Image (cartoon, rainbow, N blue to C red):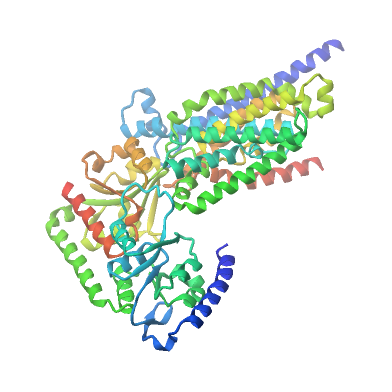
Amino acid sequence: MLRNRTILVAAAVASATLLLGACSGDSPQATASRSVDTVLGAVTVPDEIDSVVVLEGRRDLDIVLSLGLPLVGFPYEGPDSTMQLEAPLAAATTAAMADGAEELFLADEINLEAIAEVAPSIIVSRVNDVEPIIDELTAIAPVIAVNSNDDDTWQNDLMTVAEATATTERADEIIAEYDARLAEIASTYAEQIATTKVLVVSYESTGTLVQSARLPAIVLEKLGAQFSQSFAAAFDAESQDGEYGAEQTLAAHGDAEAILALADTSGEWEAAQADALWQQLPAVQSGTVVRSDKMVNEGAQITAMHLLDLIEQLYQKV
Amino acid sequence: MAVIQERLPATRNGRQLRRLVFSALALVVVALLGLLVGSRGLSPAEVLAPLFGGTDPEATAILFDLRLPRTLVGMCAGAALAVAGALMQGHTRNPLADPGLLGVGAGAALSVVLAISLLGLSTPIGYLWFAFAGAAVAAVIVTAFGLLGAGRRDSSPASLVLAGAAVTALLGAVTGIILLLDTSTLDIYRFWSVGSLSGGRGLDVLLPVLPFLAVGLAIAFAHSSTLDALALGDDMARAMGRRLGPARLTGLLAVTLLVGGAVAISGSIGFVGLIVPHVVRRITGPGHRWLLPQCAVLGAALVVLADIIGRVLVQPAELAVGVVLGVVGAPVFLLLVVRMRGARS
């Protein structure tokens, strides 16, 4: 479906681009530009970045917002998102919208026409999203692809975008801010970190899910946290996750002494409160649980800082 | 000679009754397995201990909060879907007819999607009545169009099936549009749509629906002689004094109650309504008097058995019963079709 729409829209975009180019008084050569290296090869970007569009709305959006780039367009989750908690990027996104950023299309439903209409200076997104439609996107604006594989840290991706947008100073600054906060928590809660088995687990209607390649696990690993058995198993697993049926809840996570529980909807969280096996978990019984949701699973500096706040809350309860 | 003729139906009934008792015993065994087998490897003694005063909180929670409710939900959903399938096949005189043909499942799905999207509901108990109401509204719409299409009060099976297909397509399209525009609703809906006996489907979900299922089954069983008459064709059924319009409406009511109830408690479980009547006909023959109760018993056993397989196939995770029935049920059904053809030729 995307492919068919892409072809149609690409034709429209190409026509619009030609028309805009013909009408414009400035020739492309008149705009100062430079070349930057990305995972998809060298990309020529304008020196002055007036407007940025992101396509995925998670790590790419976090990077653009944290660098203070002029965001003009981003995807949205839906008309009535069922997420109960405020997203880590909510405040920064609201501020960007006050400055003119627009919700351009539904998440996972990239609308090339809407992107072309806002005529961004650059497009930033995950490589998986841009690669299939790179020609169409490049016809609109230079594309900075990030997050090419699971091993790419948000810091690497942040620096890639920072180099493309001449904001490396700001990038260094916010990475240092994160490092300082990480060090502060590591120092303040050194004893709890060394002696407490932690677990980050998604509570779903049909069971629980533990993931080691997600941002909470990465931040906790940097912090030197001790992991519960199921969390450690996820780190060892080839799939980097562990899925457990509802009956397994106590057996799988019973050794966890502190839990960062991810429950997206109020219904899921209420189900956890009514789940006798969940309630028998020692961490739950001792109240050493902090709730968040899947929005902390992926992101960059803003989300990581939000996670550090949650982790601090968790260790405070130990 | 007269004595032999009198004894023949009695012998046949006795044989059918023995088969039904045997199936019921098989269901008891499967239900017991439903209590004993799960992704958490507890011994039978550990699992059953809470029934005899055991106080281990984990075993108690697993038995009473998880395995017992899902076994009961599976039995009720399986019985309802299998009987509804037999009713549909009897009314349409089409062995490929499925309860989904009436648009009942599509109506329930749209209603659940609206409940999630507009009201933010996200648990089975939350959208229980939405599923039921959606199923009922879809059945009423299909019936109305079926009656209009037939141009007379006694709607023909063809017009009903065509109306059902059209309404199903329309409701499916509306559901699709909403899900395309609301990815967060899609995230929740996909858990419901796959058909599952876990995920908050406890006795609190089953008990409110139980009376509807019981009434649906009662109507279906009382309807068996009419179905036998309809199997001979509309003209013959009329000649036997059956009023086709009321007969079909009664059948539709039973199907709506059964499928609406099943969908409300377990989501969208496929294949049961198609596969079970086929298998059972091989055991009982075409007469609905024994076909329907056998369908109820074996439908219940099939769904619980599929759920048990789903609990152990990908331990420590679980597969939803709808997935197991699709993945395992489809090849088994194909094998069955091939063997049936082989047996005939």
Say whether residue A245 is left or right of residue A133.
left
On the image, the x and y values in percent for residue A69 come to 31, 71
As drawn, the residue found furthest toward the bottom would be: A29
Pick whichever, B2 or A200, lies toward us.
Answer: A200
Picture coordinates of residue A203 (x, y %)? 36, 46
* Position of the C terminus of chain B by quadrant: top right
| Residue at (23% x, 69% y) in the render | A175
Is residue A293 toward the left or the right of residue A283 in the image?
A: right
Indicate whether A89 appears above or below B89: below
Query: Measured along the vertical axis of the image, is residue B217 above or below residue A98?
Result: above
Residue drawn where x is 33% and y is 80% of the image: A48
Residue at figure coordinates x 62%, y 41% from the top left: B271
Quick check: can you spot residue A193? yes
Residue B125 falls left or right of residue A163: right
Q: Is residue A151 visible?
A: no
Quadrant where the image shows the N terminus of chain B = top right
Quadrant of res A72: bottom left
Above or below — where is A195 with respect to B168?
A: below
In percent of width and height, residue A30 lies at: 40, 88
Task: Please provide percent x and percent y for residue B248.
Answer: 71, 27
